[in-house]
Image (cartoon, rainbow, N blue to C red):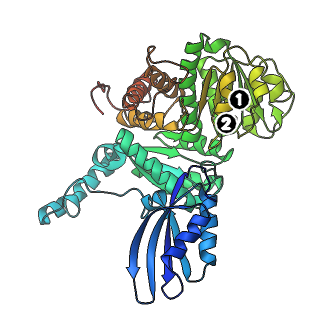
Amino acid sequence: MANERTAGLSLIYRLELQNSSITFGKVAQIIGEEGGDIIGVDVVQVGKDQSIRDVNVNVFDRRHGKVIREQLDKAEGIHVVNVSDRTMLMHLGGKIEIRSKIPVRNRDELARVYTPHVASICEAIHEDPGKAFKLTIKKNTVAVVSDGTAVLGLGDIGPYAAMPVMEGKAMLFKQFAGVDAFPICLDTKDTEAIIAHVKAIAPAFGGINLEDISSPRCFEIEARLKQELDIPVFHDDQHGTAVVLLAGLMNAVKLVGKKLEDLKVVVTGIGAAGIACTKMLLLAGVKNVIGVDRMGVISRHEPYENPMWQWYAENTNPDNLQGTLSDVIQGADVFIGVSGPGVLKVEHLQSMAQDPIVFAMANPNPEIDPDVAEPYVRVMATGRSDYPNQINNLLCFPGIFKGALDCRASDINEEMKLAAAYAIASVVSDDELSEHYIIPSVFNKKVVQAVRLAVIEAAYKTNVARRRYRDYSDKQ
């Protein structure tokens, strides 16, 4: 009996068929009996004894696709060579490449880009290392560095498996801000080794984007590199999330007629992102932030071995509340989740203050289903692209690095992050602002330029810009 669910994935089964023992009609029967829908067949190779065909099948999800593969493998005369999909095919050979900006068509051009004439460029940089920003790719290049220990929702999958994510990050840098970026996946979890490796490659780059490094190691790695390098170091999982969250919250409180300094905010998940979000909220003027993790509410009643949790206990929860999420969410204006699915319940929402604001940002499954929460909240935001108000780091990191690189900043400091948040929020006009539009789309072309200019202005004001001041408003 055909399953009435809507197919959500298209898979390509490459099948090696023995001509003497199997017909394609039998293949189609097996797939159909398991609820698959054949939408196309391509003949790859035909021989006397066997043939190879690519069969494109709509399935409900990957688990369903696996069941179909198992049934095909059981059949006599069928060998499943591999199973792929459009996403897999898009990644064949990787997603990025290096291209030359200058053609080399004759001996003279070869001599100028390489030997012997390139020696004069090397000598100029040797005499003044600062000229590397003018005469090499350093001025517009970022290293995207990971050890693969905290990749998306996958956890510690290692540096090889982290590469597709880091390649994707490099693509986004280029497409959205014109910044050249390169993935650097390190095969070590040792904090000192990671610091040493990043310092060793730093001469080639104008900035370092740390990505998907597990907590609490990520805090020390970033802090040390910021201290020991003279180029911007930015852990996007922390600060990118925090900047975009604050941008969305600024517009959400404007919509409901509240002020940041009057809010009671509850945060679940006190890891890298949760701590960074809290620091950004405090910087913006929020006074009452309460953190909740698996052990319960973080308060000064308990000593913590984790130094970041100890900092959290000393700088948040001004009324020193204790207990669980249920105890502290009563009367809260804002819930911020960077934890996991199922943490937030309807009864929690019902106990919040009037016009509750919920940022349920766990990926891929938020702390509460937005459809379940909708009747009880005024503003709902998630980390997902299939719901309104997506809190996406892509709104932050291209523009913030572009600004820092253009003014040759030595750091991305708190003032620059705060400026980026205000810039993102400003892209949504008062006329556009609504419960379903508190944050601009990642494809809004105004975002990168707004963030870039705000970051540059903040860099000059805080004396971390190293280029002579100029008007950047008409330059990308």
Residues at badges 2 and 1 in contact (C-beta under 8 Å)?
yes
**Residue 321 in sight from this viewpoint:** yes
Mark 1 burial class by Cα count in 10 Å: few <14, some 14-19, many 20+: many
Foreground pick, 6 / 359: 6
Mark 2 burial class by Cα count in 10 Å: few <14, some 14-19, many 20+: many
- Precedes in sequence: disc 2 or disc 1: 1
> With respect to residue 182, does 451 lie above or below?
above
Quadrant of residue 265 in the image?
top right
- Residue 226 at what x, y percent from top left? 54, 40
Looking at the image, which residue is at 35% across and 35% down? 406
Amino acid type, mark 1: Val
Report the quarter where the N terminus lies.
Answer: bottom right
Left or right: where does residue 450 sit relative to residue 335?
Answer: left
Quadrant of residue 339 in the image?
top right
Query: Residue 267's mark?
Result: 1
- Residue 306 at what x, y percent from top left? 76, 40
Foreground pick, 171 / 193: 171
